[in-house]
Image: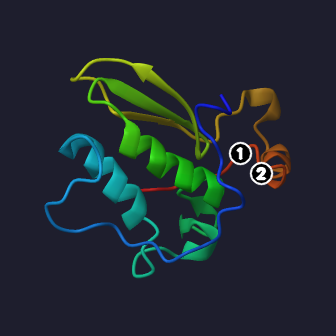
Amino acid sequence: MSDLFPMHQRAQARPVRAPHGTTLHCRNWLIEAAYRMVQNNLDPDVAENPDALVVYGGIGKAARNWDCFEAILESLRKLQEDETLLVQSGKPVGVFKSHVDAPRVLIANSNLVPKWATWEHFHELDRKGLMMYGQMT
């Protein structure tokens, strides 16, 4: 997986503004929509704490960390029209061949089985950079 989603070297917080207009940054408008929406979540006029990737709700993030955010954007820019990007707790973990009518992005956030579904365990995983509380509308 590390070759598929190379992480940037300590990507830094930066002001994020979604592109406007009719110029595509991705292969088609379906992929471009996801590309613009994830960035709009962190627009300083929209996000609660954009430097910390928090969209709203105090801890709800758009990505696990800035490296993951940049990797998501890069994955969307490269995504083919018949592929689907899989994002797990704010980190891109796979791109697989699907078809043109399939979803372009599948997201699974904060999934824990009942035995470990406690705030204590969640916060431990969050501190280790293994999970995030996803909140993006």
Secondary element at image label 1 = loop
Q: Quadrant of the C terminus?
A: bottom left
Amino acid type at circle 2 is: Asp
- Residue 22 % position (x, y): 13, 61
In the rendered view, would you say 105 is above or below 98? below
Q: Residue at x 78, y 46 (%)?
A: 122
Q: Residue at x 25, y 40 (%)?
A: 27
**Which residue is disc 2 drawn over?**
126
Query: Label 2's element?
Result: helix
Residue 105, located in which quarter of the rendered image? top left
Q: Is residue 7 visible?
A: yes
Taking depth in this image into account, of 80 and 49 the one nearest to the observer is: 80
Q: Earlier in the sequence, mark 1 or mark 2?
A: 2
Comparing 19 with 53, the one in front is 19
Could you tell whether 111 is left or right of 40 in the image? Answer: right
Q: Residues within 10 Å of mark 1 (few under 14, many from 20)?
A: many
Report if the CB atoms under discs 1 and 2 are less than 8 Å apart: yes
Q: How is the image coloured?
A: rainbow
* Residue designated by label 1: 131
Q: Nearer the viewer, residue 42 or 118?
A: 42
